[in-house]
Image (cartoon, helix red, strand yellow):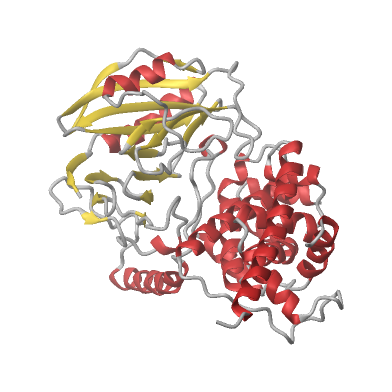
Amino acid sequence: MTSQRDIERILDNWLRDGPDAVADRVIDAVADRIEHQSQRPAWQVHWRDSHVTTNLKPLAAVAAVIVVAIAGLAVIVGLTSRGGVAAPSASASPSASAGATSSAAAFACYGETTGCAGPLTAGAHVSANFLLALTFTTPDGWVNVRDISRTYGLETDLGVVAPIEVMGLNAIAEQTDACGPVGKAGAGSSVQDFIAAVQSHPGLDATAPVAAEIDGFTGQSIEFGVKSTWDKYCQEIDPTFPVVLMLTDTGQPPGRTIGYTVNQRVRWTVLDVRGEIIIVELVGPAGGSQFTSSMEAAQAVVDTFKFGPTR
Amino acid sequence: MDRDLVEAAQRGDRQAFVDLIRPRSHRLFAIAQRVLRDVDRAEDALQDALVIAWRDLRGLRDPNRFDAWLHRLLVHECIDQASRERRRTSILRVLPVDGPAAPDALLTVADRDQLERGFRRLQADQRAILVLHHFAGYAPSEIAETLGIPDGTARSRLHHAHRAMRAALEADARTSITKGRPA
């Protein structure tokens, strides 16, 4: 039998043994990667499942070659990447977002390892992995940051513009001390149930919902923020701000935990798309005028959404 | 002064960020390698944690907490890496015999092999807490601050991790005995 003190002594000694120096190339690679990675404004930094995928690194070298090739081609034909692109056209065939752009591999996708397309060229696009084939049009400067079955995410750092998350497989979350992805027992799953969960939440300050429609599918839209009096924390994830946990997903087990903090204001558009409840979420800064302006460019993209068949 | 570098990096100065992380990288890598028990995966976890740090740096309200925040990102990334590792076919790599001299003469190659197996049986968060305590030298209160958990939780998790390690070693010893027994 090994005693407690033995274990501590053994671990002290054993863990001392091992490599202590990292190769310079690792930090050089980080320097290269952040060249392609913009910083998120403070109000956009939430603690939801936001990990960088690692399976993209082998592609980085390929992407770098493509970037160089495209840059060379642009010089040859006298185009610039911004001035030479065609205006978005609704009739243009959408490009599948996955692998659509040259610097995708260098971009930090959020969440799981199924990836994302990274920077998008101006024009029409379609999701690759989201549960519905989502078609939309963006101007230049938007980035697909997440494309997994339950979530499709778009962001831009061109000014203060709300990031967009389109979420399926939704379930209302239980606020637990551990802040894990736990569905609320007995919660409904209709458009009205999700809207009512926002309206009745003691930690949220919400507007009255209004009727909404995207691509012919109807639902309701509501805006809300976290009350300054809310005092529930998710200590393991963010000890600095109180968090209202709102959403998880219907997976077994669920993997999503979506929460909001006091420095954000949120617009949800909740739609019933052929029986699947889709939440289109825009998150802006909490300040009134900044929030309004952050919604404009994002809502313009949302207004182009077309929900295709289930994949 | 590092606070200046953190603030410059928060304003978007990439060189300031690289200057900030380069001297910290060896220590961070050593922690990641000990949690993940694999050099390649430790390099991956470190790279990813640092890119996330750059991306989310503006959300860090107190520049003086940069180190604790960075360690937290690294530990979360290691746990994430380890959970992906669990989904793969695991190939056990035995510690090299001709590596650095064992600091404790009592630890034979066989001992270290057994420790390696026992340690790998632990959950990634238990491995992380043991590494922070026994390798990085963090007291439970510092582990609590790094991981953003209450002090009591850190103590309790450390205790459970020790217990799990002891159980893993004993389980390994039983397996070895069983395997060595004639059919």
Q: In the depicted view, which residue is nearer to us: A141 or A303?
A: A303
Question: In the image, is B173 to the left or to the right of A5?
Answer: left
In the rendered image, residue A200, in percent from the top left (x then y), is placed at 42, 14
**Residue at (31% x, 38% y) in the render:** A169
Q: Residue extending furthest left?
A: A91
**Image coords of residue A204 (percent x, y):** 48, 18
**In-image side of A133 versus A152 (left or right):** left
Q: Position of residue A195 (x, y in %)?
A: 34, 20
Position of residue B157 measured from the top left corner of the image (x, y, whole percent): 70, 46
Q: Would you place residue B137 above or below residue B148 in this image?
A: below
- The residue at the point 26 percent across, 46 percent down is A131
Q: Between residues A152 and A155, which one lies in front from this camera angle?
A: A152
Query: B109 or A301: which is nearer to us?
Result: B109
Based on the displayed image, in which of its 4 quarters is residue B49 positioned? bottom right
B31 or A10, nearer to the observer: A10
Question: Residue A155, relative to residue A14: is it above or below?
Answer: above
Residue A13 shows in the view: yes
- Asked whether residue B63 appears in the rendered view, the answer is no
Number of callouts: 0
Residue extending farthest front: B183
**Residue that appears at 35% across and 42% down:** A251
User: Where B23 falls versus B72 (above or below)?
Assistant: below
